[in-house]
Amino acid sequence: MTNRLARIDALRGVAILMVLQLHHLSSSRAYQHLGLPDWTGALLGGGRAGVDLFFVLSAYLLTSNLLRHRERPMLAPTFYLRRAFRILPMYLLLLTAGMSLATVLYSGGATPGAWLWRDRYPLWIYLTFQQNWVSGWQGYPVAQFFGPTWSLAVEEHFYLLLPLLATRLPPRRLAIVAAVWIIAALPIRALLFGDVSAVAAYAWTIGRMDTFGWGILLALVPMLWPDLPKRLDPAFAIKLGAMIFVVASTLSPELLPGMQETILYPSWTALASALATYGVVHRREASASGAVVRALEWCGRRCYSLYLIHMPVMGLVFLLAGKDRPLGVDASSFALLGLSAAISFALADVCYRRIELPFMTMAERFAPYRGQPTQRTSAATG
């Protein structure tokens, strides 16, 4: 179990580093300024698949945990309370900091930091996790201080359904639901792309059901398909997932220009993420203990704080340097990008140790799982 949890932390580390390099280097046009070949830029721009990996991992871990404890009393309320302890402290801190800074900076009538706060939604939108729906209707993202929270909203919507499905449906019916989600996600994204907006196809919860479906199926493997790891080699699954990601990132712009990012590409990255997660979870050999793996584990344990704060930190560093938005177009900008990354890692470590860990300890104290589980699967606690 310890090795498995360490490997999952390392996989989380891969996911957060994919997202960080995307925002620091790809979205800031740093790769374009460096003159990288188109295929390299497309591959590195595929860092947005880190979000898909987070979704699959989250669905796998939480579904596994619910299945393991499904006969315990008061399971759904306990699940919701534990999620609140895990998610809300850092999220509310981000909202408080962002809204307070915006109020101070805009109180004098000036408009600094447009990239960070322009067209931000009312606070109640963020408090009720509706930002992904609103941005989809509007058709464009706003207020990058809170930008990463769209995916947090998607996960919160999934959390509302998960205890009801995992505790009330027999495993085979739950697998059918997950399979339907996987199949339906692609045509739903296509419909949203044509009738609402590209942002809706990418960010609305109903367009991301396949990632959660894959996670649920992975959680059901020990119960429904216990011999699968003998038939599908975990190491091969990891390699196959990596190959699918590379091919989809580098070739999909040529295959479906204009549509691949929001319709087809997420289907491939969801599958790649599922294969990688399957491989990491079911590998039997001991985890490597090299410096790279330990660094990935360190990042993985702090991925939630890193995910929430890296955009605000990057924007504030550039704002203090007199630049309205992060752009990697010269030597000084590259220095600012490096500085913002260093600050993000340091601040995330403080947030993890001082905020996340204490509240996770409180969750164990105030929302313990009661009674004895009747079945066990290979899962991590949620």
Image (spheres, grey):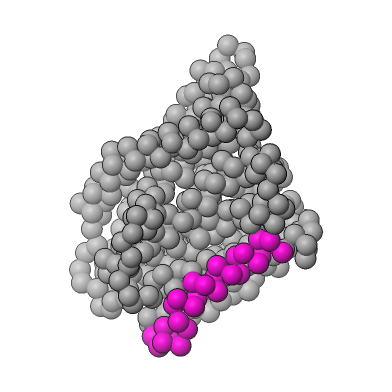
In percent of width and height, residue 184 lies at: 64, 70
Confirm whether the magenta stretch covers residue 229: yes
Q: Identify the residue at horizontal 52%, vertical 52% (top origin).
A: 18
Q: Identify the residue at horizontal 35%, vertical 72% (top origin).
A: 67
Confirm whether the magenta stretch covers residue 216: no
Outermost top residue: 108
The answer to whether residue 143 is left or right of residue 264 is: left
Q: Identify the residue at horizontal 60%, vertical 30% (top origin).
A: 331
In percent of width and height, residue 187 lies at: 71, 68
Where 21 falls versus 297 (above or below)?
above
In percent of width and height, residue 144 lies at: 58, 36
> Which portion, as a residue range, is magenta?
226-251
**Quarter occupied by the C terminus:** bottom left
Q: Identify the residue at horizontal 43%, vertical 67% (top origin).
A: 60
**Quarter occupied by the N terminus:** bottom left
The answer to whether residue 134 is left or right of residue 212 is: right
Where 352 falls versus 223 (above or below)?
above
Question: Which quadrant holds residue 323?
Answer: top right
The answer to whether residue 154 is left or right of residue 254 is: left
Where 344 falls versus 40 (above or below)?
above
Question: Which quadrant holds residue 264?
Answer: bottom right
Task: Look at the image and tell me whether residue 144 can be seen.
Answer: yes
Count the labels in the image: 0
* Secondary structure, magenta segment, majority class: helix
- In this orientation, which residue lies closer to the viewer: 370 or 343? 343
In percent of width and height, residue 279 lies at: 44, 73
Task: Look at the image and tell me whether residue 134 can be seen.
Answer: no
- In this orientation, which residue lies closer to the viewer: 91 or 76? 91
- In this orientation, which residue lies closer to the viewer: 373 or 9? 9
